[in-house]
Image (cartoon, rainbow, N blue to C red):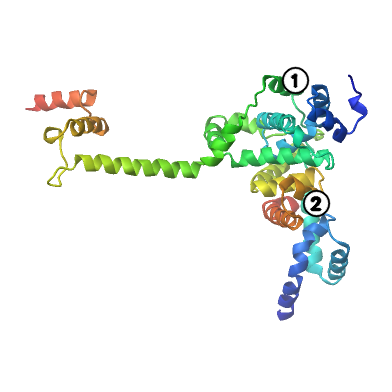
């Protein structure tokens, strides 16, 4: 068992090179080292065999060709001086990737929420309602926030509940 | 003045393209469009998208023709443009999100796109089904690789580029290419183990 472990440790530098060896991308000195190691190491031989069979398994004989008119399409775009992907699109995409955009929107939401909350807090620390608004801005903000209520004024739900409440009384 | 571009190397034709010769450009497109298209198709696995991206490669070729150095291989330069377009596609997270949204209601189209046409028809329906399943597994495994590993794999396995050429195309060192391929193969070995049983 101990011998097995030490063999595996000794194999590490060769294992890293097996892929390049299988691809025929190896300097002469490394190739000699690996070949002599393979002669004595059945596990590395097995690894090499697996790498080669993987390469075979990736065989993918597809036949894909461009559409007819491909060349004319390119020339038309060249003549009109357009690309279907303008550079500003990519540079904007790089400058403003999705995670940064989401973070920015979240930050804006927090700031806006804080500002709205602050604007609705009265001197005594309680939330103002429509009747206690001190300024026209506060009044407008409270009115605007009403659209988020379950039954904003003027909606069908508000009308129904009002009528239902009056009928119950 | 008319030239006989057909007998010229792509490197020589590029000299005319960089001078604004559209006839030379047409010859280059016709000569290389299928290679560029199949390389991109193996990367994105969607014919419409591969078509758009392949056009973009040639538009960039035209736009940046003046930057081509005749000392370097035209094919390597063309693969560099192709790889850059593919990398941009991977980085374009907005497009990916839109595609993801689109995939919810166009799964039928996607399934259609993801089935490449086999070069040879299998002799029996059963063999065809087995081969189709094998190819599906291979495509899914390759698509699961990170962009740079996938590019290195496509360039090495299907386009036959050397590590040195891939390093030039991906603008990295040869050991970095080696490392990309080691990781790609390790992932594929795990994912495709059912195929090798």
Which residue sits at x=53%, y=37%?
B97
Dot 1: element:
helix
Dot 2: element:
helix
Q: Is residue A27 left or right of residue B138?
A: right
* Up/down of B183 relative to A144, above or below: below
What quarter of the picture does the N terminus of chain B occupy?
A: top right
What quarter of the picture does the C terminus of chain B occupy?
A: bottom right
Q: Which residue is mark 1?
A: A72
* Up/down of A78 relative to B142, above or below: above
**Could you tell me which chain the residue with mark 1 belongs to?**
A
Q: Nearer the viewer, residue A103 or B77?
A: B77
Q: How far apart in space, not on screen, are marks 1 and 2 (Cα)? A: 34 Å
Q: Residues within 10 Å of mark 1 (few under 14, many from 20)?
A: few
Q: Is residue A125 left or right of residue B149?
A: left
Which residue sits at x=71%, y=41%?
B83
Q: Nearer the viewer, residue B151 or B42?
A: B151
Where's residue B137, x and y in %?
Answer: 68, 44
Answer yes or no: do the residues labelled 1 and 2 have beta carbons within 8 Å?
no
Which residue sits at x=31%, y=40%?
A112
Work out whether residue A2 can be spotted. yes
Q: Which mark is residue B164?
A: 2
Work out whether residue A58 can be spotted. no
Q: Nearer the viewer, residue B4 or B69?
A: B69
Q: Residues within 10 Å of mark 2 (few under 14, many from 20)?
A: some
């Amino acid at each position: 068992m101990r011998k097995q472990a030490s063999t595996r440790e000794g194999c590490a530098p060769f294992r890293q090179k097996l892929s390049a060896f299988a691809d025929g991308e190896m300097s002469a000195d490394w190739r000699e080292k690996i070949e002599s190691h393979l002669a004595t190491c059945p596990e590395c031989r097995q690894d090499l065999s697996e790498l080669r069979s993987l390469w075979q398994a990736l065989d993918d004989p597809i036949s894909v060709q461009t559409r007819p008119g491909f060349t004319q399409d390119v020339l038309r775009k060249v003549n009109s001086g357009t690309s279907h992907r303008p550079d500003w699109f990519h540079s904007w995409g790089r400058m403003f990737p999705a995670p940064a955009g989401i973070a920015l929107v979240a930050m804006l939401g927090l700031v806006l929420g804080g500002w709205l909350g602050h604007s609705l807090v009265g001197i005594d620390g309680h939330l103002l309602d429509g009747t206690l608004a001190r300024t026209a801005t506060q009044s407008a903000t409270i009115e605007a926030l009403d659209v988020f209520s379950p039954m904003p004024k003027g909606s069908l739900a508000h009308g129904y509940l009002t009528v239902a409440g009056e009928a119950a009384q | 003045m008319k030239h006989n571009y057909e007998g010229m190397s792509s490197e020589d034709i590029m000299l005319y393209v960089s001078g604004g010769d559209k006839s030379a450009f047409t010859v280059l497109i016709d000569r290389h469009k299928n290679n560029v298209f199949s390389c991109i198709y193996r990367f994105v696995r969607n014919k419409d998208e591969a078509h758009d991206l392949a056009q973009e490669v040639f538009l960039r070729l035209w736009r940046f023709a003046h930057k081509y150095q005749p000392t370097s291989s035209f094919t390597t330069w063309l693969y560099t443009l192709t790889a850059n377009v593919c990398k941009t596609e991977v980085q374009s997270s907005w497009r990916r999100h839109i595609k993801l949204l689109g995939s919810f209601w166009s799964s039928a189209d996607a399934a259609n796109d993801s089935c490449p046409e086999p070069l040879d028809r299998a002799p029996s329906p059963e063999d065809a089904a087995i081969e189709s399943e094998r190819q599906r597994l291979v495509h899914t495994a390759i698509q699961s690789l990170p962009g740079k590993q996938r590019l290195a794999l496509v360039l090495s396995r299907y386009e036959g580029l050397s590590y040195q050429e891939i390093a030039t195309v991906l603008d990295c060192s040869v050991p970095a290419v080696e490392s990309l391929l080691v990781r790609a193969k390790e992932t594929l070995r795990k994912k495709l183990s059912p195929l090798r049983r």
